[in-house]
Amino acid sequence: MKIRPLRPDDAEQAFQLRVAAFSAVTRDDYDADEVYIPDHHRLVAVDGRRMVGHAGAWPFRQAFGGHPVPMGGLAGVVVVDDRRGTGIGSQLLSAALDHMGDAGMVISTLYPSTPLPYRRWGWEFAGVHARGTLRTRDLLDVPAPTSGIVLRPYTPADLAPIVAVHDGVTRTEPGGLVAGERWLRRALRPDPDEPEIVIVATRGDDPVGLLLLAKTQPTEGHGSYGLDVRRLFGVDRDVERVLWRAVGYHHPVAARTSFVTRPAEPLLFDLQHGLDVSGALTMRFMTRLVDAPAAISARGWPAISATVELEIVDARRPANAGRFVFEVRDGAAALTAGGSGRVAIDIGALSSLYTGFASARQLAHAHRLTGATDADIVALSDAFNAQTPFLRDYF
């Protein structure tokens, strides 16, 4: 058994491997035009001619401190049924970490089907992706916009400007996915099995927002259909309000709408009687620093001065392990080899601190940050400026 890069003639076999692992069927029709992770960022485990495992890394960026950080979105990690528990998954994760490091992906984020193997390899819970449902008719209480915004159907010619709008919005959000054109092309590709509505908001001639709305089965036993807001974003609140009201007009035939909700959901401040969210489902993503010094340099930082001498424990990436001086000055930070190593932290805990998901005090209470004085904890808290990171997108 060996791990190697995916080749073009592997594509269908890799597709069927993913289908068998993540769906209720064992095989599906293969689409050679499927938009997926670029082949040069995919790895396969092979035993002779048989493919026994797969892993890929989307070349994303993820925003922290207002700066988009090069991120490998680990996905499609699969081992065939009869070879699970034999170490293939660990070999794939090891090779994927090396690949992401070589490709300049200084952090990695994933949605775990089970967290334990990823935690063993240094990933840790680092943010949320939350969904809920609301009464569709309540969306008509959203205030009408104060500027001229026109809605029209999406066309493929809108892709580039819509990517710019999407990435411009998400780069301002803690943990936001700065996805790029390939991901949005995949997200906006019509699904033949689901009725979808894709609407572009324009101001003048310029696209300024997008709504991707899917019709689903009714959720309350009545109505013609339910609604699922797959994507809704705009350059400002007026644009979002127009798009939410467009969803609200479906209320005579769709009683409830599901949507991705943000930790400080703007609808909380728009709806007159509050936001009645039910059926909330929260998923948590995991993040790992692949190249800790580069990741620290790439992130945005507050304009403070702080220094903490760290001992980083990372059994999987030796370049990240050892004594480092963490220093923040005037909106920039560095992790430099040296120092006393007085404050010890493992790479998973550092990754969760990095995103702002876990605070320094929480990690100290969990004994994942040891040797820290109150002054160290305050310095780390001020530097990482904890706020709940979230992803609108699931990959």
Image (cartoon, rainbow, N blue to C red):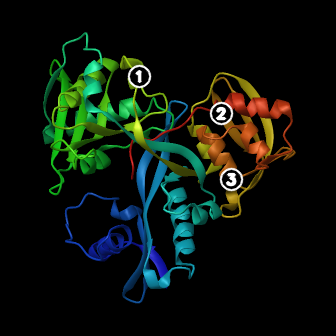
303 and 102: which one is in front?
303
**Few, some or many C-alpha atoms within 10 Å of disc 1 (few <14, some 14-19, many ≥20)?**
few
Residue placed furthest toward the top: 146
Q: CA distance from mark 3 to mark 1?
A: 40 Å
The residue that mark 3 highlights is 347
Q: Quadrant of residue 328?
A: top right
Q: Position of residue 260 (x, y in %)?
A: 38, 39
Query: What label does residue 241 carry, if any?
Result: none
Q: Viewed as shown, does residue 315 lie left or right of 105?
A: right
Residue 39 in view (yes/no):
yes
First-in-chain label (3 vs 1): 1
- Measured in 3D between alpha carbons, the distance from the residue under mark 1 to the one under mark 2, in whole angstroms, is 31 Å
- Around disc 2, counting alpha carbons within 10 Å, would you say few (fewer than 14), some (14 to 19), or many (20 or more)? many
* SS under mark 1: loop
Can residue 293 be seen at all in this image of the molecule? no
- Report the side of 173 relative to 233 (left or right): right
Q: Position of residue 369 (x, y in %)?
A: 78, 46
Which residue does the image show at 55% across and 52% down from the upper left? 286
Query: The residue under label 1 is which amino acid type?
Result: Gly
> Mark 2: which secondary structure?
helix
* Residue 175 percent location from the top left of the image: 50, 39
Q: Amino acid at mark 2?
A: Phe
